[in-house]
Image (cartoon, rainbow, N blue to C red):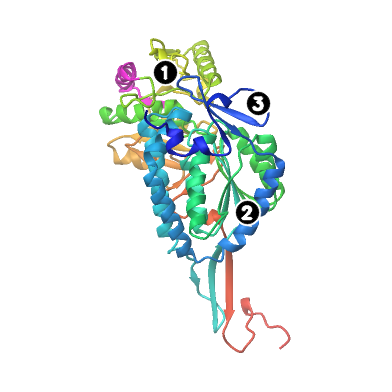
Amino acid sequence: MSMTVLERLGLDRHPRVVTGQGVKHGVAGQVVVTNPATGRPIAAVILDDERTRESVVAESCEAFRAWREVPAPARGQVVRAIGDEFRRHKEALGELISLEVGKIRQEGLGEVQETIDIADYAVGLSRTLSGPVLQSERPRHRLYEQWLPLGPIGVISAFNFPNAVWAWNAMIAAVCGDVVIWKPSLLAPLTAIASNAIAERVSAEMGHPGVFRLLIGTDTQIAESLVEDRRLPLISATGSCRMGRRVGEVVARRLGRSLLELGGNNAVIVHSDADLDLAARSILFGAVGTAGQRCTTTRRLIAHESVAAEITRRLAEAYGKVAIGDPLNEGTLVGPLITPAAVETFLAAIRRARDEGGEVVAGGERASGLPTEIAGGNFVRPAIVRAPSSNRLPIALEETFAPILYVFTYRTLDEALAMHNGVDQGLASGIFTDSLAASETFLSVTGSGSDCGLAYVNLGTSGAEIGGAFGGEKDTGGGRESGSDSWKAYMRRQTVAVNHGKQLALAQGIRFGE
């Protein structure tokens, strides 16, 4: 008999994981992890309490004092070794992600690859952390900036990226000299346990224990306490806009920093001269990938009136052929939603869209005719809803975390941009066009184009590379993670002035007591 993924990752022996006959619903201090594709329990996880949280934070403060003294290139070597260990466990971790949150196999593997990639990126960063040398107005003075480790940081992650979002934060923070305390979603604790165990084991074996810590518990007992804790100078939180407002308010009251990655109501504009083959393929992945449970999911299609009917026809045809089923089967393109409640939210949004005059042209119902082994799963058929001729569809202004694509039409690009920007969130955006003028209007440096943190030309909204800063504006929270200069969020800036002369020279030419 082949080993299960829990056995391959050692989770069957982990002290916090309950398997087999010990998995029972309603046990105090435990959460049962359910496979969304089958509706059956995978394992139970023992939760942390307030006493454990306090111990972890105190120990993390001690670990930080040692870790910050390690030279940044040496910290990079620890992260390099962690990345190598994720390479060795990529297949098993990818399978666990599919099992726990329902991502198709390719997306589960892709998420672990993202962790490997950000580790590689962080290794290079460890030798290039730098600040500018500035020109002093005073003779025989040197003026420069340096960046210093910030402290223990809290990372609160959502279910839909149970490995990569932590890694975006943890790998960068680690080379910056910070210790990371991770509070994952209770819908995906197994991936968190496996991932954090790899990082902490490698770090400890290299002589640096306590750099990566994990707290699994309720929002009330664990997340709220972390957010309120003044010993954590930064809280990085990924989740809903409602959650982000709460985190931002609490952290701001104690004058801490928050890095918020919140919701997205992302749109793609298809201009009159677009390559419709390219657009259709890209929109399909952006709209149905991860069963619509990405913050970067394409939720609105704004098509020029001359191509709207054709692009909608192509997409509806493609939706009819999308393979829905067991996410671990190679041919599956759409797996389940995370919970039965998510299915109900999807169906309620479809009903409301119809009530508001929308026309469902594809999908929009529970998936039927599935094999017996997954008949109890949370499967739906991804939907395309065409807005009425008035282009008024209020439900489309809200983010439903499910595979629903709303289709609108436009005549002028200014009209399209107004619709595109007319939502509360500002995460990912795209335009399909062969027109230089249209693409440059969309990317206008005056700010009159896309108001999102991510803007793509002839690309869909999903699939960001780790080299660029990831994040959005407006209700998306304004945070930036991953590449570019996102590392600055995890460090504190210090302006340094050195007088290597013998005279007191004051700035602005001030004379004092002479």
- In-image side of 178 versus 406 (left or right): right
Label 3 close to label 1 by CB (< 8 Å): no
Q: Amino acid at mark 1?
A: Ala
Pointer 3 local density, CA inside 10 Å: few below 14, some 14–19, many at least 20: few
Does any portion of residue 216 appear in the rendered image?
A: yes
For the magenta stretch, what is the residue range? Answer: 301-323
| Image coords of residue 186 (percent x, y) | 58, 32
Q: What number is the disc on residue 27?
A: 3
Location of the N terminus (image quadrant): top left
Prevailing secondary structure of the magenta residues: helix
Q: Amino acid at mark 2?
A: Ser
Q: Nearer the viewer, mark 2 or mark 1?
A: 2
| Image coords of residue 178 (percent x, y) | 56, 56
The first of marks 3 and 2 along the sequence is 3
In the rendered image, which residue does mark 2 sit on? 60
- Distance Cα–Cα, label 3 vs label 1: 38 Å
Question: Tag 2's secondary structure?
Answer: helix
Pointer 1 local density, CA inside 10 Å: few below 14, some 14–19, many at least 20: many
- Distance Cα–Cα, label 3 vs label 2: 29 Å
In the rendered image, which residue does mark 1 sit on? 383
Q: Is residue 499 above or below residue 305?
A: below
The first of marks 2 and 1 along the sequence is 2
